[in-house]
Amino acid sequence: MTITELQQLLDAELLTGGDTNTRILSACGSDMMSDVLAYVKNRAVLLTGLVNPQVIRTAHMMDMVAIVFVRNKKPTADMIALAEQSNMIILSTPKRMYEACGVLYVNGLKGDGELNA
Amino acid sequence: MPEQLQFHYDVDGGNFTSAGQASVQVKNNLSQLGLDPAVIRRVSIAMYEGEINMVIHADGGSADILVEDGCITIILADKGPGIADVEQAMQDGFSTAPDNIRSLGFGAGMGLPNMKRYTDYMKIDSVVGEGTTITMKVNF
Ligand SMILES: Nc1ncnc2c1ncn2[C@@H]1O[C@H](COP(=O)(O)OP(=O)(O)O)[C@@H](O)[C@H]1O
Ligand SMILES: [Mg+2]
């Protein structure tokens, strides 16, 4: 799935630059950053309702491709700057976590693609 | 790559907003050296969990990273409260973090176990009332 496809499926707003043809192969939905840090996934998108700079840094540490903030949450300008420094694509969707994950899942984005550390 | 490279960072304890900055810089430095991305990821994740721990549990500390041929060593040292029972702290889900830390996305008690899983070697030296030093190694 590309960022453009994800954006359409989630009615999401794109908040950074970046290549929207970038492909995503897996996904992770969580508000607990240590859960996110526990399993490395390949070319993953992070869906979260948590808004702070650690979300951006966590996704960066994990080599994730994009972050989607659910329930219309918007990162601060500082967070967007931080994301752009690490080429992270940020989106915001009005959907809630459960629905956002479900929509992506039924459209072919599975949670797996896990790598060994 | 030069024979040996060292990075040193002071980790500010009073500021959660900046927590993780040192790990981001280490990740960027290691990427410039052209190391295997999977190795860099293991080092960055382990250091990041440890850096966050120093901020939330120990009021900050220092991070030293040594890059040698075949091995990266991460040393995180703080003068915080220390860990009374290291074996208990290493258990999945054990946490003394207050609720406000959980609302920031940490405090699930997964940090130390994650650090152990992502590294090839991890040693915790801790004295209650004096501080904690965690040494981790990732081989490549
Ligand atoms: N640097 C440290 N100084 C003092 N205590 C620590 C330190 N790092 C970890 N701990 C203790 O070990 C526990 C478990 O750590 P961790 O697995 O990272 O979980 P969490 O940080 O989510 O609480 C912490 O709750 C804390 O009691
Ligand atoms: Mg922790």
Image (cartoon, helix red, strand yellow):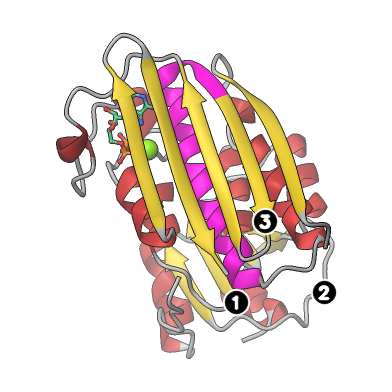
Residue A69 falls within the magenta-colored stretch: no
Is the CB of mark 3 within 8 Å of ligand 1? no
Q: Nearer the viewer, residue B108 or B132?
A: B132
Amino acid carrying mark 3 in the image: Glu
Which numbered marker is on residue A43?
Answer: 1
Q: Is residue B30 left or right of residue B45?
A: right
- Mark-to-mark CA distance, 2 and 3: 35 Å
Q: Which residues fall within the magenta stretch?
A: B37-61
Which numbered marker is on residue A19?
Answer: 2
Amino acid carrying mark 2 in the image: Asp
Whether labels 1 and 3 belong to a single chain: the reply is no
Q: Nearer the viewer, residue A52 or B60?
A: B60
Q: Label 2: few (<14), some or many (≥20) within 10 Å?
A: few
| Kind of element beneath mark 3 | strand
- Mark-to-mark CA distance, 1 and 3: 29 Å
Can residue B42 be seen here? The reply is yes
Residue occupying image coordinates x 51% and y 59%: B138
Residue placed under numbered mark 3 in the picture: B68
Residue occupying image coordinates x 47% and y 69%: A40
Task: Report in which chain the residue with disc 2 lies.
Answer: A
For this orientation, the residue located farthest to the front is B3
For this orientation, the residue located farthest to the bottom is A108
- Would you say the magenta stretch is mainly helix, strand or loop? helix
Q: Point out residue B139 in the picture as x, y percentages from the top left corner.
A: 53, 65
